[in-house]
Each structure stands twice: as structure tokens, then as C-alpha cells.
Image (spheres, rainbow, N blue to C red):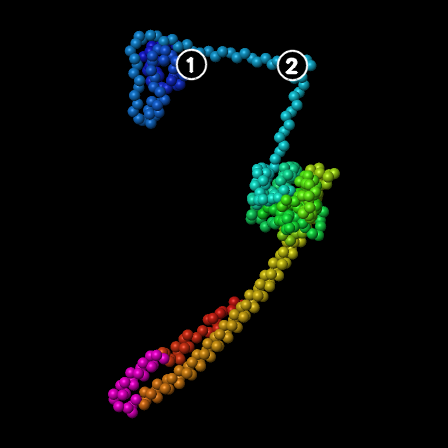
Amino acid sequence: MQLTRLELYKRVCDRPVSKVAPDFGISGTALAAICKQYQVPYPGSGYWTRKSLGLPAELPQLPATSDDIIEITPSVPKPRKPRQKKLPEEGSPRNTRAAAKPRRAARHPLLFGVEEHFRKTRDAKDGEFLRPFKRILPDVISSEPALLRALSIANDFYLALEKEGYRVHIVPATDDLRRIHVNEQEMERKDRKYGRYHSGSIWGPDRPTVFYIDTVPIGLALTEMTERVTMRYLNGDYHREDSKPIRSAKPWQLTHSWTTEQDMPCGRFRIVAYSPKNGVDWSVSWQETAQEPLGGMIPNIVDALKAAKDKLQRLMTVEDEAAAKRKREWEEEWERYLRQEDARKAAHALTDSRQQLAEIIEKWGKVMTIERFFADAEERLGGVDEERRHRLKERLSLAREMMGSLDPLDFIEHWLAPDERYRSKYI
């Protein structure tokens, strides 16, 4: 296409370069280069912005020079060469199918980011259970060395339940479900010796971790178990009898040391399933041994929990009936209490009303004596001289004002009848 500088100038001043270039079959960058070559100015992006907003904008002036004919040739894209697939040589290692990359192990949503929260813990002696500050966490109890394995077992267990269609989650605050006490001893004993002075507390979440089989909730807890070990006191602290500090100590260093027994985490785990519903006493546990790890038991555990649904449903039904009965008994007992209180208050109101009336009658008797006194005094005023009568009359008026009202109707007006004091709700 051929055109003069003036014609090109008018085109690029009428529309942006990027809009004019397709008319010539070239790109906006190529047209800008042609304008620069032939000294054809064109407005920048600021000009078009101001124009779109209705603001005044100045166009660049076309410099005076020779009015040459400009030849613009549309650009023709080069055809792409088809890619030729290189065939592997016979016997080449590439001829064999590359092994698939191993898939990253799946992580249950409930366990995302929990490791960091478990490690943010209160002070814990070496080998003791972690005590995280956060209280809304999956029900996993572990020492620091066994934490990663604990989370791995929990992950495998939760994923196995999810595969069966059961969603494992932490109970919302609005649900009336509770967490039971989880025994951490590998071998149950009558006494407990966990922690220094055998009174250490084990952390537990505020809300249980559960899943539902239909409408039946089942609580889940994973805990590292403890074993009874011999501890020796050395340099202000207790150490395992078979630990390196004790084995490397000199005989004279052990002269003033002594031993005791404590329950310490052993690195083996137990899964506890229980009913989180109040009043339903049901729980079952599976614990690993040195010969049988807990991970291999997970499929059997899931099957056992599925089979326990009917039994749990019956126990929940029995508990619901028992709870309804207890509620009826409590309501009946409360009704009896309310009736007794009503009768007591009505009797008390009657007693108070009678007592007030008796006090009014007694007070009226005293008032009549006072009234007779004033009447007798006024009668005697007739026998005294004028000056004394006037003085005594004033004093009798002051005395009457001081004694107040002597009208029996005023006393009766302030008396309260039994029904005015308390009206029975059951009569």
C-alpha cells in the first residue's frame, strides 16, 4: 500500500497506532518504526486517555520535509516447519516406558498444619507428652520424638474412614458430645506414676474427634502408651537407668543418687474408639506391639467399627429412653417442689396477715386509752380560769399532733390481706 506522509499522519492522529496497523497488515510496532523513519509524529497513550475523558489534548505537529511516497508492505508469517518426532533407537534405554513418578502421600484435611501447633507446647521434660497451647486439635497424644509417626498413623486411619464415606472432624461447640478419659498405660495398673511426683497431667483437646455412621457418632483418640521404667536421679534431674548420662557416669557420681519408677512414653500407640454421647458407656481399643504395628491393623479396625454400629444404636436408644424417664422424674419432682413452696408461701402470707391484724387491734386498744385521756383533759378545761385554759388548750393540740392519727380506719387501710401478700398458683 502506498500513501503520503500527510495521509499517514492523518490516520495515526485519528486512531491509535495499534488500531491503524491492522489496516496495513502489519503490527503496531512495525507501523511505529515506519512513522519514526519518515518523521511522522503520532500521539501517545496520554492523548487518547484525555480524549476519552473529554479533556483538551494537543496533537503533535507534522514537521515540514519532503512529501515522499511511503510504501507499506503487509508482513507474511513464515510457515512453521512440522516437528518430526525422533524415534528412539532400537535397544535404547529411552525405548522403555519411563517409570511413573511416585504420587505424593495424601494428607487428611484435618491434619493440615497441625504439626506446628503440636510443637508449640508448654514446657515438657524429655520423653514426656506434648502439651500444646492450642486446645482445638485432633485427638492425638504423643511425645515429641514420636509426633511424626503419630500424625502418620492418624492420617492413614482418617483416610481409611474417608474412603468408606465417613468424614472425620472435630465436634462443633454446639453439639452435646463429650470426650472420655483415655488411659495411656500400656499395661493397666492400679497406680499411676506419670510425671514428676507421679501427679503429671496429660494434655487432651477440648472437643472430641468423631465420625458418623448414619446418625451414630463414634469418637476417636490416638494416644502413645506409657511403660513403667526405672529412673535414676542425677545432677538435679531424673534419667532412664539405661540412658547415656547414667551409663557414662562415674561410680562416685552415683554415690548420692537414687532410683524411682515412672510411667514414660514408649513409642507404641493405641487407638481408642468410644461413644461421645452422654450416658452411653461403650469403648474399644486396639494397641500395637513390637510384632504387629498399628498401621497394619487399620483395615480391621474400620471393619470392626462398621460392625459396631447396630450395638451402638441400641445403646443410644436405651440411653435416650432412660434420659426421657429421668427428665420426667425430674419434672415431677420439680412440680412437687413448686407446689410445696406455693403452699408454704400461702401459709406464711396468712400468718403474717393475722399477726398484722392482731398488732392493729392491740395498737387500737392503746389508742383508745390515749383518746380517753385527751377527752378527759378537754372536759376538765371547763373548770379552770381563762388564761390557764388557753395555755393548756394549746399544749393539748401539740400533744395530739405528736401522737398522730388515732383513726382506726387508717390502721385498717394499711392492713394487707393474705391474698394481697401472696396469691396461690394452684388453688
Q: Is residue 348 magenta?
A: no
Residues at discs 2 and 1 in contact (Cβ within 8 Å): no
- Magenta-highlighted stretch: main secondary structure? helix
Which contiguous range is marked in magenta?
381-403
In-image side of 408 versus 226 (left or right): left
Residue found at x 29% / y 92%: 383
Residue 285 in view (yes/no): no
Where does label 1 land, which residue? 26
Q: Residue 355, how many percent across, how many down?
A: 48, 77
- The type of residue carrying mark 2 is Pro
Residue found at x 45% / y 73%: 416
Mark 1 crowdedness (10 Å alpha carbons): few <14, some 14-19, many ≥20 = some
- The type of residue carrying mark 1 is Ile
Looking at the image, residue 388 lies above or below residue 313: below
Residue toward you, 357 or 426: 357
Residue lying at the far front of the rendered structure:
252
Residue found at x 71% / y 50%: 189
Q: Is residue 388 magenta?
A: yes
Q: Indicate the secondary structure of the residue bearing disc 1.
A: loop
Mark 2 crowdedness (10 Å alpha carbons): few <14, some 14-19, many ≥20 = few
Q: Indicate the secondary structure of the residue bearing disc 2.
A: loop
Where does label 2 land, which residue? 88
Q: Residue 292, how many percent across, how many down?
A: 73, 39
Residue 90, disc: none
Q: Residue 94, how many percent across, how many down?
A: 65, 17
